[in-house]
Image: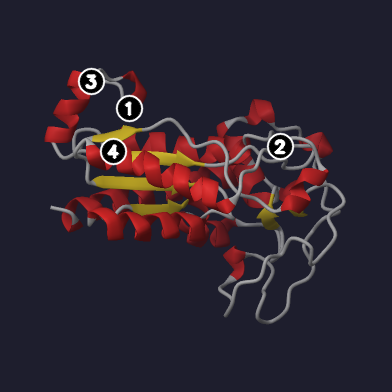
């Protein structure tokens, strides 16, 4: 049986609704990731985590995966390199919001956005709060990086600052998921992020910081990267992918209990 929402008939979707199923929405962006990674990196990661979680949950809960949201907001600076397709924050928030409202209008109540892009979390939270105010339906969002953070810290080879954008984390995942799209001969550590302080330890995997500040513009990027992809490996990618999928499944199961 297909886990893809788009491959179901209207009748099959009504049965899914009646069974109080959960919808996963992969969320990414087409965005430059340097010379060694494809622009669909964030989309691939979010989509593959969502699909793997849905497959793993077969027989336990009803889960379908929606087609990916493939554009969103990112810093204007990234348009210095070809490939990025960005929309304003409000446009992205409204797209996600109205996709979810469509699902809610047809009777679905369990919705989880699986996000693969670092500049989306706050916008997804805004959409969730607005949806709750308007419908009393409480959707959720989960970030792949946060789902896999503990696992990545155990296996990473880069120092803090090596995994912000196109660095070890994303490159390792892509080496595991789509090695055919990765050109490690073009990977470079020239844009290792070095603007860290005690409160900004370098990247989100190295610990929290007491406030938010956008790293884009704090340190000039020569290649469109922030981090060190040269130490990435498929083995690291496999480990963090498994951790992200496992935790995503836990989120889905918790939503089942919370939203009875």
* Front of the two marks 4 and 2: 4
- Residue 81, picture quadrant: top right
Task: Give the side of residue 66 with respect to residue 11, left or right.
Answer: right
Residue 116 appears anywhere in the view: no
Q: Residues within 10 Å of mark 1 (few under 14, many from 20)?
A: some
Figure quadrant of the N terminus: top left
List the residue tagged with mark 4. 103
Q: How far apart are marks 4 and 2 (CA)?
A: 33 Å
Dots 3 and 4: beta carbons under 8 Å? no
Foreground of the two, 227 or 17: 17
Q: Earlier in the sequence, mark 4 or mark 2?
A: 2
Q: Distance between the residues labelled 1 and 2?
A: 28 Å
Task: Give the side of residue 110 with respect to residue 151, left or right.
Answer: left
Which residue is depicted at the point 79% across and 59% down? 192
Q: How far apart are marks 4 and 1 (CA)?
A: 11 Å
Which residue is depicted at the point 82% across and 35% down? 185
List the residue tagged with mark 1. 5
Q: Which of marks 1 and 3 is nearer the N terminus?
A: 1
Q: Earlier in the sequence, mark 3 or mark 4?
A: 3
Dots 1 and 3: beta carbons under 8 Å? no
Q: Distance between the residues labelled 3 and 4?
A: 13 Å
Q: Which of marks 2 and 3 is nearer the N terminus?
A: 3
Q: Residues within 10 Å of mark 3 (few under 14, many from 20)?
A: few
Q: Position of residue 76 (x, y in %)?
A: 73, 51
203 versus 182 height, above or below: below
Callout 4 secondary element: helix
List the residue tagged with mark 3. 10
Q: Where is residue 166 in the image (x, y as percent from the top left)?
A: 70, 47
List the residue tagged with mark 2. 37
Q: How crowded is mark 2: few (under 14 residues within 10 Å), some or many (20 or more)?
A: many
Q: Which of marks 1 and 2 is nearer the N terminus?
A: 1
């Amino acid at each position: 049986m297909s886990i893809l929402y788009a491959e179901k008939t209207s009748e099959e979707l009504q049965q899914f609704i009646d069974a109080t199923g959960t919808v996963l929405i992969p969320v990414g962006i087409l965005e430059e990731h340097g010379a060694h990674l494809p622009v669909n990196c964030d989309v691939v990661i979010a989509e593959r985590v969502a699909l793997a979680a849905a497959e793993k949950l077969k027989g336990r809960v009803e889960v379908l995966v929606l087609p990916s949201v493939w554009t969103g907001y990112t810093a204007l600076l990234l348009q210095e390199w070809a490939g990025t397709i960005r929309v304003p924050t409000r446009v992205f928030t409204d797209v996600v919001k109205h996709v979810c409202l469509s699902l809610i209008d047809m009777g679905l109540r369990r919705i989880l956005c699986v996000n693969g892009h670092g500049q989306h979390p706050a916008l997804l939270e805004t959409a969730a709060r607005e949806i709750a105010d308007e419908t009393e339906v409480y959707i959720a969002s989960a970030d792949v990086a946060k789902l896999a953070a503990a696992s990545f810290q155990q296996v990473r080879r880069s120092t803090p600052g090596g995994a912000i954008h196109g660095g070890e984390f994303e490159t390792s995942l892509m080496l595991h998921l789509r090695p055919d799209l990765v050109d490690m001969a073009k990977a470079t550590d020239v844009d290792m992020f070095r603007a860290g302080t005690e409160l900004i330890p370098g990247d989100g995997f190295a610990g929290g910081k007491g406030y938010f500040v956008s790293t884009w513009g704090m340190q000039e990027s020569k290649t469109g990267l922030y981090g060190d992809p040269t130490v990435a490996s498929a083995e690291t990618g496999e480990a963090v992918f498994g951790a992200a999928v496992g935790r995503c499944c836990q989120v889905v199961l918790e939503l089942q209990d919370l939203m009875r």
